[in-house]
Image (cartoon, rainbow, N blue to C red):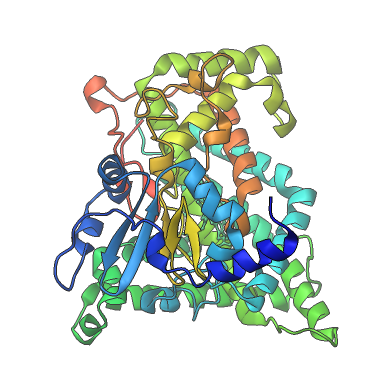
Amino acid sequence: KCTAVESRLLQYLYQFLPRTSSPSLPGPPGLFLIGNMMELTHDHLPIHLTNLAQRYGNIYRLKCGHTTMVVLNSTDIIREALVKKWSDFAGRPGSYTGDIVSGGGHTISLGDYNEEWRAHRRLVHSALQRCCQQSLHDVIERQALQLRKVLMDYQGRAVDLSEDFTVAASNVITTLAFGKEYDKSSSELQQLHSCLNEIVALWGSTWISALDSFPLLRKLPNPVFSRLLKEVVKRDEIIRKHLNNYKSQDKINVDAITGSLLQGLEKQQNTEHTEVLLTDIHVHMATVDLLIGGTETTAAWLNWTVAFLLHRPEVQTRVHEELCTVLEGRYPTYSDRHRLPVLCSLIHEVLRLRPVAPLAVPHRAIRDSSIAGYFIPKNTVIIPNLFGAHHDPTIWTDPYSFKPERFLEGGGGSTRALIPFGGGARLCLGESVAKMELFLFTAYLLRDFQFIPPESEASLPDLKGVASVVLKVSPSQF
Ligand code: HEM
């Protein structure tokens, strides 16, 4: 046992120990200059990084130009970095292209950890909380009923539902943000979606990420990058128009997030001792965050649910029977979730197999630290491989199989090992919105519809999907 003085002394001496006393991180050998860049060009990066974990372990490093990335592949290791040592790893790596899509780092999702970011996140978090308490359930219920009507109108025809799911998820966010919902045929809505979709897809492409690691490439013509710039300008015009319309209303509705944010700004500007001054740019970029974060993710998850259910129709039948027995004909409410274990097991299993943000968003070490006993120097980029953690064979039996029953009593699966929303200071800002949406949309859909493949087994959807920032199902018809 050592005294407080001795332990202080040991701590003091520890900082002078050579860093090599910590084992060096394993990782694949790299090529001269480009390092492990080629590892990042695989068409399904989450699967590739998970396969590398089989060879190099649950924590390994990749080098890309001058950047060192550390990939974390188990829930425990990810929690150690994101939750236990959140204050060491709450940063975001700055990047040339990230700065462009985030209006100079002013989004919550890509902004680095500092006082301004903290004030911004606090402002948006409390606006979202307030708005969720007042209207979230009603807003989702209305969209679920609207989605039901759209599906009824198909009268059993084979259709690709992805657009309908996107409209439903997007309408939840636009109603929360602006108090406004759209019709599927609205040109404004289509413009907004195509532009947000393009930005997410283009930004995830190798042509764009190469510009971050190799500045010389920025001097060469790059049509993909030109498209990205055009889409960002378009996005900003659409959002600016919305915000201006909103502000021009006689009375600002503070029940909607935008109103609450604008009111928050006003309050803050009237406070004398604020160290950080948030402005309209922060409201603008928070809207971008909510629209991007809240539309494609939820829609992709709904598509995955239908795709998996087509492969195991008996699960669909079990959920339907549970809904009929428990609800006795009425529509579900969020408080019913405790009485619907089969439905919840389905939600958890889809989140496990297809965490829709499979590599979360990269983190940055804001100071020297360690993970799993390895020394991690300041500025190392941390990739939480959520997909890998959800397929960790030491935690999940038969990790690649769709088995919702693993989450039912005696099934052996634990929701504690799930980490689809990340954790710590950067925990998904929309986690509670997403959870309620996943529950209510799925319950409404499976109460009234049965999803079947159009013709034969041959037309069952491919379950590998397409991985970019968001992990999506390849388009198909149900
Ligand atoms: C961040 C997952 C829905 C808004 C994230 C992150 C993940 C995630 C993994 C990154 C966490 C990290 O960096 O460690 C999901 C999943 C969703 C979902 C699985 C649905 C199934 C939503 C919704 C919204 C939203 C509905 C908005 C209402 C955000 C924002 C961030 C974020 C703003 C950035 C947080 C920050 O950097 O501080 N989400 N999300 N997400 N999400 Fe979500």
Instruction: Please provide percent x and percent y for residue 118.
Output: 66, 71
Q: Is residue 230 visible?
A: no
Q: Residue at x 19, y 70 (%)?
A: 34
Q: Position of residue 465 (x, y in %)?
A: 31, 41
Q: Does 476 sit above or below residue 135?
A: above
Q: Count every numbered label the image shows and give the total.
A: 0
Viewer can see residue 104: yes
Location of the C terminus (image quadrant): top left
Q: Going 54% across and 60% down the picture, which residue do you hit? A: 291
Q: Quadrant of ligand 1?
A: bottom right
Residue 209: x percent and y percent?
30, 69
Q: Is residue 40 left or right of residue 104?
A: left
Judge from the rendering whether residue 245 lies leftward or rightward of residue 368; answer left or right: right
Query: Which of 29/425 is in front?
Result: 29
Q: Position of residue 432 (x, y in %)?
A: 66, 46
Name the residue nearer the viewer: 364 or 120: 364
Q: Quadrant of residue 289?
A: bottom right
- Position of residue 466 relative to residue 234, above or below, is above
Left or right position of 137 against 24: right
The foreground one among 458 and 364 is 364
For the point 70% across and 61% down, the residue is 125
Q: Name the quadrant containing residue 436.
A: top right
Point out the residue furthest to the left here.
32
In the rendered view, tell whether residue 336 sits above or below residue 441. above
